[in-house]
Every structure is written in structure tokens, then in C-alpha cells.
Amino acid sequence: MDVAADLHVHTTASDGRLTLSDLPAAARRGGVDAVAVTDHDRLHPGLDAPVTTLDGVTVIRGIELQVETATGRVDLLGYGVEETPALRAALDRIQTDRVERARRMAGRVEERLGVDLDVSFEPGVGRPHVARAVDESEADCDYAGAFDRFIGDDGPCYVSREVPSVERGLDLLSDASPVVSLAHPFRYADTEAALDLAADLDAVERYYPYDRPVDEARLDEVIEAHDLLATGGSDAHDRRLGITGLSTTAYARVASRLPDAQG
């Protein structure tokens, strides 16, 4: 399938490598015409409209918001987001918690390893920033090892963070965004519980670069049963776009729900 739109991309506003100015060139290298910037729990501060055009590339202001469900945490993707006062207040609280969490984790790693970590404690910070700092420090530990040995979910330096309930997250995103999608359903321990949310959503992430086989027929069944849009993207945290995503036809269905691009 030719990929025309990559609707799951992270930038330096959270834990990605791309800056906003890098985005058009990266999109052209990946052969995509449209990109959704979906930083973790944050609207990109450089995007001032739900949909805009940057150097000929359609850029959708999105977000990846983690929420708590009865069976675990899942991620929701909002597209064409119009910032509301309620969403702004919630994101500010989440980012304050993220910064404090990163400080605590970095401090625990520094104490355990006897090194100083160079981490910028600012909105968007997360575990990848701590892991990169470990990799770049004098510690005998690389990026993957930082997660495996210290800051993974069961690690001795891990610190949990507060996230909104799924009900609150859905209220916030539904008021702010014309399309709310379930991100990567086959990454959760309980896929069926995650897919049970579909009845309250607009879309499901159908195309995603899983590193294992997935039940595509099950995804198609859920999409058809609830008359959902199919979304998709590379979940890029580096500079490579278009690894997977939507065809021109599939993207047109999503675009029809979004505001017209400003540029």
C-alpha cells in the first residue's frame, strides 16, 4: 500500500527527534502528503490551527493522550484539535506531573549510578529523555539498558505518573477534536478490553508498525461494526515518516471530518 498520510508522529515537543521545521522535508522523504503531530499529552506549541500547511505539507494538530481504564492504560489519538480551556487546564496539570516525575526518576538513577544526568525538565519530558541522558553520561549503560535496568515499569528507579480516567479523557478530546481514535490496540495486554472502547470513539488505528502478527480481520470487524474511520501511522520518534499510514482514499475519509487547512 502506498502511504499518503502518516497520522502518528512525535516531535521534540515530547520524545521525538523531529522539529516542526524538519517536518516537511521528512514528509517528502517518506513520500507522504499529510502528517499528524501527536505528541504525548501535549499540543505542539508551534501549531496554531487544527490543520495547517507547512511548505506544501498538510500538518494536523493532534495529540496522544494516555488514559486509565479498568484493565490498564491506553492511548487515545485526537486529530484536528481545537484547544479548549478544559483541555488546556488538563494538559497543564499532566505536564507539571510529567516534569516532577522525570526529576524524581533522574534523581534516583543519578544516586544509583553516581553520575550527573543532563535532562531538560520542561513540558514534554518523559522516560526517553532520561534514558538518552543515561546513554550520554559516563555510566556504563546505554539507552535500552536504562529502561531494562532502571526506569522500565518494574525498574527500581521507575516513578508512576497520574493520568486522567478514560471517561475524562474522552470528554476532553471529544469536545476538542472531530476525530478521536484508539492508538495501536494490539500493544495492550488486553486488546479486547481496549477495543471495547470503540463504541465511544470515531476511529481505530488500523495501520501501525507492530513487531508481531496482529489480527487484522478483528480490527476490520470492529471498524465495520461501529462504522469507524481507520487511522494509521508510523508512531515516529525518529526522523523517518511513512513507514506505515493511510492510503490516499483512507486519508480522504479522515480529512473530510477535519477543518480545512490554513496556510
Image (cartoon, rainbow, N blue to C red):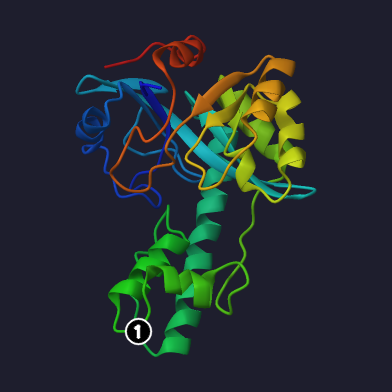
Instruction: Please tell me whether mark 1 sits on a helix, a strand or a loop.
Output: loop
Q: Position of residue 181 (x, y in %)?
A: 59, 29
Q: Position of residue 66 (x, y in %)?
A: 60, 46
**Pick the front one: 56 or 192:** 192
Inspect the image, locate mark 1, and give the three-letter code of the amino acid beneath it: Asp
Residue 191 vertical placement versus 34 (above, below): below
Q: Position of residue 222 (x, y in %)?
A: 71, 24
Query: Going by the picture, which residue comes out furthest to the front?
Result: 213
Q: What residue is shown with label 1?
A: 140
Tally of numbered discs: 1
Residue 223 vertical placement versus 74 (above, below): above
Residue at 35% of width from left, 86% of height from top?
Answer: 115
Residue 226 vertical placement versus 106 (above, below): above
Classify mark 1: residues with Cα within 10 Å, few (<14), some (14-19) or many (20+): few
Residue 198 in view here:
yes
Residue at 36% of width from left, 49% of height from top?
Answer: 16
Left or right position of 218 against 240: right
Q: Position of residue 170 (x, y in %)?
A: 67, 33
Query: Going by the picture, which residue comes out furthest to the right?
Result: 70
**Pick the front one: 38 or 237:** 237
**Pick the front one: 206 or 96:** 206
Left or right position of 204 against 130: right
Residue at 47% of width from left, 88% of height from top?
Answer: 112
